[in-house]
């Protein structure tokens, strides 16, 4: 379980919104032919990664609002094969991102226990899940399509802190994180984080 201190709802929501803004920009810049490209997520195309991201954030929104979630719906991997992007992927991601941010702000989510796929967790944890999903899958999509990605330094730092806490090997065994990849001594913090999470760097 994450023990990172909660810096305050307004600051956390602003950070989440910055993470979403960067990834929405990536989806808006993917060329038409890029959606069928293979992604760094094994077996998934870029479009499948985008579907998974929108589906995962929709789940977070439902948990934040304490809506019932069935076992089938809780499997975020299944959303890769559900068309959640439609004709305007950036708009689809923006819509669910705004719902998440609103839920974090409106329901005092960060200050109470909320349901999640692993059981009751601090609401603050949901914001870190959003940051990780948005940051890493934003990179997946950008890397696969040659699209520029301007990741926010504060988001990178928050995700790195979160990812390196808790039962790391259990997360790898569950498929949340892939096996760690080698990083070079001169790599950026973002590249070291990506390697830690199992992304192969060029």
Image (tube, helix red, strand yellow):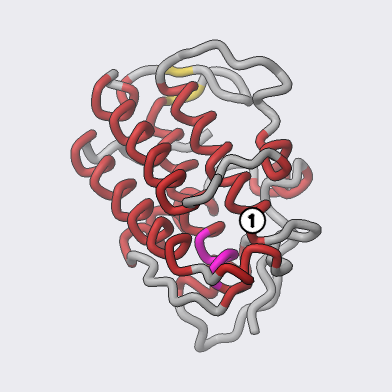
Within-10-Å neighbours for mark 1: few <14, some 14–19, many 20+: many
Q: Residue at x 25, y 22 (%)?
A: 106
Quarter residue 197 falls in: bottom right
- Left or right: residue 159 compared with residue 99: right
Range of residues picked out in magenta: 138-142
Q: Which residue does the image show at 61% across and 46% down from the upper left?
A: 51
Q: Residue 73: horizontal and vertical position, in percent?
A: 66, 24
- Callout 1 secondary element: helix
The quadrant in which residue 79 appears is top right
Q: In the image, what residue occupies the spot 49% across and 23% down? A: 121
Q: Look at the image and say whether residue 2 sits in the magenta stretch.
A: no
Where does residue 122 sit, x and y in percent of width and height?
43, 25
| Residue at the spot 54% in from the left edge and 71% down from the top edge | 31
Front position in the image: 63 or 124:
63
- Residue 98, percent from left and from top: 33, 38
Q: Is residue 49 left or right of residue 189?
A: right
- Of helix, strand and loop, which mostly describes the magenta segment? helix
Q: Compared with residue 17, is residue 151 higher up or lower down, i.e. above or below?
A: below
The residue indicated by pointer 1 is: 47
The quadrant in which the C terminus is found is bottom right
**Residue 55 to residue 39: above or below:** above
């Amino acid at each position: 379980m994450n023990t990172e201190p909660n810096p305050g709802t307004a600051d956390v929501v602003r950070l989440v919104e910055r993470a979403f803004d960067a990834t929405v920009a990536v989806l808006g810049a993917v060329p038409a032919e890029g959606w069928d490209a293979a992604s760094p997520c094994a077996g998934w195309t870029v479009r499948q990664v985008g579907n998974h991201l929108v589906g995962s954030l929709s789940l977070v929104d439902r948990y934040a609002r304490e809506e019932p979630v069935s076992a089938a719906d809780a499997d975020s991997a299944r959303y890769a094969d559900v068309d959640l992007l439609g004709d305007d992927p950036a708009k689809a991601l923006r819509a669910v991102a705004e719902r998440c941010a609103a839920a974090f702000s409106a329901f005092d989510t960060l200050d109470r226990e909320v349901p999640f796929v692993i059981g009751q967790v601090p609401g603050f944890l949901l914001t870190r899940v959003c940051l990780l999903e948005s940051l890493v899958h934003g990179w997946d999509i950008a890397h696969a399509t040659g699209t520029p990605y301007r990741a926010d330094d504060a988001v990178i730092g928050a995700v790195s802190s979160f990812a390196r806490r808790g039962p790391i090997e259990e997360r790898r065994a569950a498929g949340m994180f892939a096996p760690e990849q080698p990083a070079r001594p001169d790599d950026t913090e973002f590249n070291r984080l990506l390697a830690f999470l199992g992304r192969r760097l060029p």
